[in-house]
């Protein structure tokens, strides 16, 4: 179970890192032209960059805090934050009729639920 939780957290961290780097460093106009990125054309640049920075922090919170044994309780807390982010992403993509992205975000949400449940519960770092 511990290994499965590490793998799930690692996958989520990779997704968060990729999304964070993209949203933080790729121009909003280029993101808006990409498949699934149309929503970025409807919001301000600061909002997109803020989401990117939050995703970079999530990538660190999902793995590094436990790997370095610096506040490992942040792993499940970050997973809960990721759940909230995925709910927002699902609503955004759903409103735009992008059902494939809704399903993808649902898969990420399920992984985050697993990590939050496992790290708050049976495989807690505090035990």
Image (cartoon, helix red, strand yellow):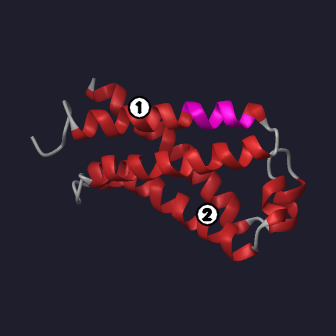
Residue pointed to by mark 1: 7
From the viewer's perspective, is residue 103 above or below residue 88? above
Local secondary structure at mark 1: helix
- Identify the image quadrant of the C terminus: top left
Q: CA distance from mark 2 to mark 1?
A: 22 Å
Local secondary structure at mark 2: helix
Q: Earlier in the sequence, mark 2 or mark 1?
A: 1
The residue located at (54%, 58%) in the rendering is: 55
- Identify the image quadrant of the N terminus: top left
Question: Of all residues shown, which one is farthest toward the bottom?
Answer: 46
The residue located at (52%, 63%) in the rendering is: 54
- The question of residue 82 being in magenta is answered with no
Q: Are marks 2 and 1 in contact (CB under 8 Å)?
A: no
Q: Position of residue 29 (x, y in %)?
A: 87, 66
Q: Position of residue 28 (x, y in %)?
A: 80, 67
Q: Position of residue 76 (x, y in %)?
A: 32, 46
Residue pointed to by mark 2: 52
**Residue interval drawn in magenta:** 101-107
The residue located at (24%, 52%) in the rendering is: 72
Question: Of all residues shown, which one is farthest toward the top?
Answer: 1
- The question of residue 102 being in magenta is answered with yes
Relative to 76, is 37 on the left or the right? right
Q: Position of residue 99 (x, y in %)?
A: 76, 32
Closer to viewer: mark 2 or mark 1: 2
């Amino acid at each position: 179970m511990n290994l499965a939780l590490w793998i799930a957290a690692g996958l989520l961290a990779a997704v968060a890192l990729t999304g964070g780097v993209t949203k933080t460093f790729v121009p909003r106009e280029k993101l808006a032209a990409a498949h699934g990125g149309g929503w970025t054309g409807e919001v301000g640049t600061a909002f997109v960059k803020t989401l990117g920075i939050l995703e970079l922090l999530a990538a660190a919170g999902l793995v590094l805090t436990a790997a370095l044994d610096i506040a490992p309780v942040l792993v499940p807390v970050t997973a809960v934050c990721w759940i909230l982010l995925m709910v927002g992403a699902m609503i955004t993509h759903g409103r735009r009729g992008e059902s494939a992205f809704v399903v993808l975000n649902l898969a990420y949400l399920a992984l985050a639920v697993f990590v939050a449940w496992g790290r708050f519960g049976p495989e807690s770092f505090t035990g």
